[in-house]
Image: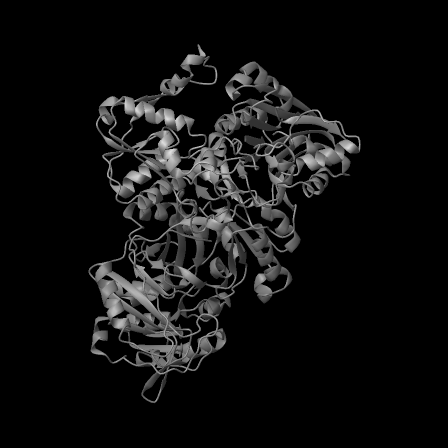
Amino acid sequence: MIVLLLGSGGREHALAWAIKKSPRLEKLYAAPGSDAIAELAERVPLDPLDGKAVAEFCAKAGVSLVVIGPEAPLAAGVADVLRAAGVSVFGPGKAAAQLESSKAFAKDFMRRHRIPTARFATFTDAAKAKAALPEFGLPVVVKADGLAAGKGVRVCATLAEAQTALDDFMSRGALGEAGRRVVLEEALSGPEASWLGFCDGKNFLPLPPSQDHKRLKDGDLGPNTGGMGVFAPTPTVTPAVVKRIRAEIADQVLIGLAKDGLDFRGLLYIGLMLTRDGPKVIEFNARFGDPETQAVLPLLQEDVLSLLEKTAEGKLKSRAPRWKGASVCVVLASEGYPDKPATGRAISGLDDPALSQALVFHAGTKKEGNVWKTAGGRVLGITAVGETLEDARAKAYAAADKIRFEGLQLRRDICGQAAAPAGSRA
Amino acid sequence: MCGIVGITDRKDAAQQAYLGLFALQHRGQEAAGIVAAEDGRLNSRASLGLVVEAFPQDILAGLSGDSAVGHVRYATAGDSNLRNAQPLVFDNQHGPMAIAHNGTLTNALTLRRRLEKSGAIFQSTTDSEVIVHLIARHPGPVEKAVVESLRQVEGAYCFLFLTPQKLIAARDPMGFRPLVIGRLGKSWVLASETTALNHLQAEFVREVEPGEVVVVENGRLRSLRVEAAPKKTAMCVFEQVYFARPDSTVFGRSVMATRQALGRELAREMRGVKADVVVPVPDSGVPAALGFSQESGIPFELGFVRSHYVGRTFIQPAQVLRDNAVRLKLSPVREILKGKRIVLIDDSIVRGTTSRRICKLLRSVGVREIHMAVSSPPIVSPCYYGIDTPSKRELIAANNTVEKIRHFLDVDSLTYLSIDGMLRAASAPGGPKPGGYCTACFTGKYPTSIADFTIGEAGRCRGPVAR
């Protein structure tokens, strides 16, 4: 099979690594890819947002499956263009991708189909949003409707903070168009978990539940980031909880997709809060999480390429996947991340023999001559798999400690307490 | 001190208010009152006594209306008459209105004198009546008159105002007293403590913020502000230490969690104490004693059995028996206490007389050593913000050293919790911060002017204007 992977980050590096393991793979292309992905795939100079150009390349190169990594091409409808051209695609079309790209759409979807989530209301008028604010509990979550690269969510402890957030998003246009429409939402509290699964619109095949660490610094302090590390499986999601999530959330999503006539063939990411009143949905994503993918894929004892293909063709089975062990992924980030990451710093230690115990996924690197240099906010994801979480954690940090670059930031407490710390977030 | 509750949009509003008051009974036992709004008029009933005594079923059933406010009033010496019972009901340019108040206005006397000079006639001796006169002098709409009036008062307050159309709630800008918002179906509930929401099976929404005025009208809740910018808060730490019910969450912190943490802090400060058992003075000392036991490893024992039937209705047969009143309420368990070295935990010592009697009782059943441990610092100053601590003259810690108090109580050692330890226990990440509390009763540092209280008799706890 000839496969084209769209994207260039750590998530795509992990996908390329997993696809590459398949005996059924004939050739792997990546667009635009990265210097690290180039070691596993042939890079093609294509813009992933240009559906027409991607479709033309597929016809020319005989590509039978396109795997879309990031959210932007999904939101732009690239999957629709490709399907119209007769190419099999892993990734939902524009309509179904709204589960991620529009918070208001996702909330309405959940309300329509009685999927447990935080109480919410959508506003396009700042004055009306402010007038409704007092009826919400505190803290209250103010969310910009559109994609805002992690800056569109503010958890406000007081009415004054929430009013400022509304002013910033809606009146001052701090996020541009993304903030013109705003969702006000009750803040939930409890441990968080991410549940990723292959979804072909009718079936859901879940991966091991994982837990993300959003804050930059140890002890869940510092600013929000794209994610500083993940571990899986998270012990807070017990088999009993899995059963509830399956029945109350995943199955309801499938019914909702069918009722609304939404074609979702891709990865469904369910962000959860395990509240006192049971699991509730914080958000959906329509693609693999980053860095959850780096932690979860290495646990799978299945041919990932077959799962991607079956999903794309709508031939998935609703079953538990085969996986074993535990994994921890620690993210190494640049100095200044997440505000102003410094780039171009030489990375050393990548050839240390201790790294054979781990998987090194490149998120933001560049190769200059024979030297790897930093080229983004999140630079590397170091994943280790072990029998237990403690085992995986020890290996991941042993490997991470071999790697050096100027200004390196990492959290020391990924999977610090395997019993997930209670967080409070949207 | 008082407790207040309000509810909107329920056919059985008065019954719900009754339930809420029942949950808040600990905040005041002197009098109880409920006012319900029905078709443009207010039906009211107030009576001396406990909630269950004040509201027989037939009376309650007669209080029809689809919104209501209720009030329980704390016993204060000298002015326990029905005229001072709340909610106060009056007519003015805004129509009929009821008002329920928790707290004390520190400039009430100044305002009252000024109002009287301009012709106002006062009905009660409560400071709450001042606000009535202020509201009557401001043009409508009524919520605007309320906000304007509140801008003139100082001190501690949580108010509920009920008109036939609106329920208005207000909390002072420093947030001395707690006030929470709850939701029960389509109804809005406002109450002093979250335990009242639990009793009504209402869902907690949030606190009324310091300096916020909320208006419920036509099923919608709006927010106004007394002061534009939030002030530094002065939330009453004594609510956490003693006053609030332990099943409430007050200022965003579970009261039970605070009280157990107070015990743990105390155990840390008393490290090395040699004792066989930890014994609480029931009921208020129990959570701290549990925390003390967990931290120190000294076993927890219930050394007293408390009678629940010695209420306010109990008539003292004779003056001679007064000393025995403690014995009637608390009965020591000889088998647990005899020959033991005990850590005796109480939440606070006010006059010291009750503690002294308790210790005497313990000696009488053969306790070998009493190490008295108090889960709050010495109370050295009266409260002008709503707690009925007595005057400075009567506060034992205001006039004596710890060693003198130890001698008076006749115990082997006496330890008070430090102020820092108390504030640590009352704080939580994401909840109240140590600096956000008022500690005036323990430090004498008052967060507002108290000029009105020094006009009267020096050292009196209450100003000439009583609660």
Q: Is residue A299 left or right of residue B428?
A: left
**Residue in front for this viewpoint, A373 or B434:** B434
On the image, which quarter does residue A168 sit in? bottom right
On the image, which quarter does residue B240 sit in? top left
Q: Position of residue A274 (x, y in %)?
A: 38, 48
Q: Position of residue B402 (x, y in %)?
A: 39, 38
Residue lying farthest bottom?
A: A369
Q: Position of residue A7 (x, y in %)?
A: 41, 73
Q: Is residue B219 left or right of residue A338?
A: right
Q: Is residue A170 left or right of residue B421?
A: right
Q: Position of residue A119 (x, y in %)?
A: 51, 46
**Residue in front for this viewpoint, B214 or A294:** B214
Q: Is residue B151 left or right of residue A347?
A: right
On the image, which quarter does residue A397 sit in? bottom left
Compared with B403, A297 (above or below) is below
The quadrant of the image that shows the N terminus of chain A is bottom left
